[in-house]
Each structure stands twice: as structure tokens, then as C-alpha cells.
């Protein structure tokens, strides 16, 4: 009896493993879509939130709010953030609780490399020790 099941198990087991892998990777992507590791130098620059874009993503009857911020920084450069997802991002939670609003001042965290510059975070109500001129 087990001799007849062995070839079937050899065919079905890799398919099952692949299905679990696809399910897990999709779940991880939904849970933390912003986990991209950004290379380059990290800066902290004083800035003010000038605009907050809000968007609602719907996936499998579940909705996920996300936010993107525009910053007016003390060095005269307007910066835009990555998308912040309320699923696992403390900044998005602060925005939803209205602790961070348009006009809020604080420190903008910036990743800077040769190709691009992106704001990755914001600490409301703080100022940096070193100001970029």
C-alpha cells in the first residue's frame, strides 16, 4: 500500500512546499511592504510637513491605509517620503491618531545615495543637533 503512495507523495510534496512558499511570501509582503533596505548615507534634517497624501488599499476584503508625506526642509529642499503603511509603521499610526499633521515640525530622516534621496521617517516635535546648510 505504501509503495503506491510513495510516487504520489514525491509529486505532491514539492507542489505543496511551493504553495506554502508563495502564500508566505505574499503574506510577508502585505505585512511589511516597506522593508526595502535603502543604501547610502542617513541624514537627519529639520523640516516641516507640508502635505499628507492618504490612500486606502483593498486586498482580499481587507483595507490598509497608507500615507505619503511632503516635507519642506531647513536646507531649502522639498522632500517626499516613502509610503508609510498603518499595518506596521509607527509614523503611519501617529498620522492616523493625528499626532502628525500638515504643519508639524520635527526631524526628517533621509536616505541619500548617488541615484536618489528619499525621506524614510519623521520624528515630530524634535530638532536635530547638526543643521544642514
Image: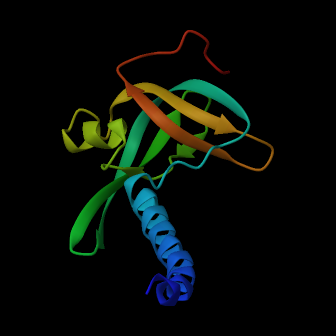
Residue 97 picture quarter: top left
In x, y percent, where is residue 118? Answer: 60, 44
Farthest front residue in view: 1
Residue 89 appears left or right of 76? left
> Can you say whether 67 is above or below 128 in the image?
below
Q: Residue at x 49, y 90 (%)?
A: 4
> Can you say whether 50 is above or below 129 in the image?
below
In x, y percent, where is residue 10? Answer: 57, 81
Q: Residue at x 51, y 50 (%)?
A: 82
Residue 55 picture quarter: bottom left
Farthest right residue in view: 114
> Can you say whether 33 is above or below 90 in the image?
below
Who is closer to the viewer here, 133 or 96? 96
Q: How is the image coloured?
A: rainbow
In x, y percent, where is residue 104? Answer: 33, 31
Who is closer to the viewer here, 24 or 13? 13
Who is closer to the viewer here, 38 or 121? 38
Q: Residue at x 50, y 46 (%)?
A: 81
In x, y percent, where is residue 95? Answer: 27, 41
Residue 116 appears left or right of 76? right
Q: Quadrant of the C terminus?
A: top right
Who is closer to the viewer here, 72 or 43? 43
Q: Residue at x 35, y 44 (%)?
A: 88
Residue 50 appears left or right of 10? left
Farthest top residue in view: 129
Amino acid at each position: 500500500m505504501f509503495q503506491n503512495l510513495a510516487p504520489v507523495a514525491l509529486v505532491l510534496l514539492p507542489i505543496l512546499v511551493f504553495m506554502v512558499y508563495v502564500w508566505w511570501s505574499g503574506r510577508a509582503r502585505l505585512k511589511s511592504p516597506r522593508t526595502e533596505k535603502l543604501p547610502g548615507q542617513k541624514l537627519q534634517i529639520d523640516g516641516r510637513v507640508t502635505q499628507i497624501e492618504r490612500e486606502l488599499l483593498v486586498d482580499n476584503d481587507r483595507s490598509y491605509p497608507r500615507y505619503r508625506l511632503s516635507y519642506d526642509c531647513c536646507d531649502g529642499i522639498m522632500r517626499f517620503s516613502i509610503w508609510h503603511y498603518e499595518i506596521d509603521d509607527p509614523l503611519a499610526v501617529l498620522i492616523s491618531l493625528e499626532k502628525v499633521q500638515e504643519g508639524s515640525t520635527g526631524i526628517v530622516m533621509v536616505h541619500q545615495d548617488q541615484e536618489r534621496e528619499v525621506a524614510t521617517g519623521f520624528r515630530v516635535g524634535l530638532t536635530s543637533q547638526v543643521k544642514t546648510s
